[in-house]
């Protein structure tokens, strides 16, 4: 399918110029006060991991601003709230995957990138710190930070992600119920609106439940 692929970093550098000294210097090995401030304002983070066979995975996590807890300058924790129980990210972590985090703050074009090693922890003190809406998670993703830096605004400026003028109406795309109906043969005889109603009821019931409770 793909031809003329690049196999070495040297080949990459023939295509791309080296980063400036300023860019290289912005990568820090711990969480400074600016990183802490951004994490405290972020209600959303994307978590990147990889499986033992090299397959990549990105999972969204959300909560009230500051739901990701900074434990100290080198460690943070992400509460595991209820999801689909496929456990893609945390299974990858158990198998030894590193972790990449991208923190987003609504309306802010810059993002915060945090990279490091990860574990799944049931440490009582960590879980107490990770309580969300008075719900204490059963487990949390612990991150040992090796890199953090602010990412420039180009991607968000190009996409106009926060610009209200670029937003589309929800009905312009199929609902999740419609997608499920089309993709899962056993759901073919169920009306998409019924599936959507069941999904909304589940959201209302389990939105703040810790992961693994259902």
Image: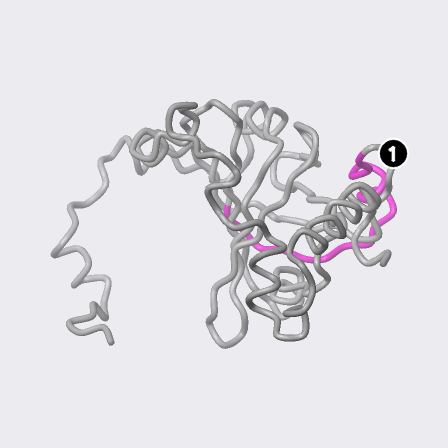
Q: How is the image coloured?
A: one colour
Measuring 82% from the left and 48% from the top, which residue is drawn there? 210
Q: Which quarter of the figure has residue 155?
A: top left
* Circle 1 residue: 134
- Residue 25 percent location from the top left of the image: 34, 34
Give the residue displayed 56% in from the left and 59% down from the top: 179
| Depth order, front residue of 54/126 | 54
> Horizontally, is 103 left or right of 80 in the view?
left
Q: Is residue 90 above or below residue 24?
A: below
- Above or below 207: residue 35: above
Which residue is pictured at 61% across the width and 71% down the height?
Answer: 184
Image x and y of residue 35, in percent: 53, 29
Q: Nearer the viewer, residue 5 or 203?
A: 203
117 is within the stretch colored magenta: yes
Residue at (54, 70) in percent of width and height:
51
Q: Is residue 40 left or right of residue 136?
A: left
Decide which of 81, 77 is in the foreground and name it: 81
Residue 135 position by quadrant: top right
Quarter of the image for the N terminus: give it.
bottom left
Local packing at callout 1 (Cα closer than 10 Å; few below 14, some 14-19, many 20+) is: few
Identify the magenta region: 115-132
Q: Is residue 34 above or below residue 43?
A: above
Which one is in front, 158 or 147? 158
């Amino acid at each position: 399918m793909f031809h003329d692929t690049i196999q070495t970093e040297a080949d990459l550098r023939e295509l791309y110029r080296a980063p400036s000294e300023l860019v290289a210097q912005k990568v820090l090995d711990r969480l400074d006060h600016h990183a802490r401030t951004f994490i405290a304002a972020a209600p959303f983070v994307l978590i990147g991991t990889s499986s033992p066979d090299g397959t990549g995975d990105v999972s969204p996590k959300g909560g009230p601003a500051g739901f990701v807890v900074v434990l100290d300058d080198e460690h943070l924790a992400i509460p595991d709230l209820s999801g689909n129980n496929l456990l893609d990210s945390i299974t990858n972590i158990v198998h030894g995957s590193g972790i990449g985090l991208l923190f987003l703050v609504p309306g802010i074009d810059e993002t915060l990138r945090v990279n490091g090693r990860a574990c799944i922890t049931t440490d009582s003190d960590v879980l107490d710190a990770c309580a969300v809406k008075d719900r204490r998670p059963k487990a949390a993703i612990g991150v040992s930070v090796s890199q953090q830096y602010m990412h420039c605004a180009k991607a968000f400026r190009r996409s106009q992600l926060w610009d209200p003028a670029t937003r589309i109406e929800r009905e312009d795309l199929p609902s999740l119920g419609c997608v499920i109906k089309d993709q899962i043969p056993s759901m073919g005889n169920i009306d998409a609106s019924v599936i959507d109603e069941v999904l909304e009821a589940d959201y209302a019931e389990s939105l703040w439940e810790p992961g693994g409770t259902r």
